[in-house]
Amino acid sequence: MEWKDGKCRCRWANPKNERYLRYHDEEWGVPVHEDGKLFELLLLESFQAGLSWECVLNKWENFRAAFDGFDPVRISAYDGDKLEALTQNPGIIRNRRKIEATVGNARVFLEIQREFGTFSDYLWSWTGGKTLLEQGKTHSDLSDAMSADLKRRGTRFVGTTIVYSYLQAVGVIWSHEPGCFLEKKE
């Protein structure tokens, strides 16, 4: 594919969507250690289930406004009125099950923080703090194990494919495709 700027990118990067290109070039795969950002991406990835990431990405700022800046403490306290308001918000994905799961997932996120000190410590403990280089996968032994652990703790919409996508997004797994200007060989 010919890119206007001459850089080759992963096949999934839509050249017609500037926000998507910035996400690919500047965010996707960059290691994240800040708990707020880790929760934000976990919330967004859970809404991706059954949809495209581009659909979620295009609504990112609407999600930020609707979900109180991705604050897990505030989200964990949402009541029925707030859940109902979210299901009526046309700026986000209004799947009631995903919205309800977000509240429970926020509670589990906070429990993991209490147990491990930070969610980042929990997340990065799975690889000993290292980024793995993998390409062409939609799940792995790591995403299978982490998905099972998160489900055991009570999270929902965190199947192995969603967890694998999350691990790629937050830089635990580096997956830029062969030929992409961000590809790493080792």
Image (cartoon, rainbow, N blue to C red):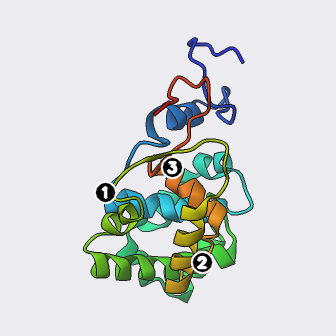
Q: Position of residue 29 (x, y in %)?
A: 47, 43
42 vs 20, left or right, is left
Q: CA distance from mark 2 to mark 1?
A: 22 Å
- As drawn, 26 above or below 9: below
Q: Earlier in the sequence, mark 3 or mark 1?
A: 1
- Seen at 50% across and 77% down, the residue is 105
- Seen at 64% across and 70% down, the residue is 159
Residue 34's mark? 1
Which quadrant of the figure has residue 175?
A: top right
Answer yes or no: is residue 69 visible.
Answer: no
Instruction: Count the numbered circles shown.
Output: 3
Which of 110/173 is in front? 173
Residue 156's mark? 2
Residue 169's mark? 3
Q: CA distance from mark 3 to mark 1?
A: 13 Å
SS at mark 2?
A: loop
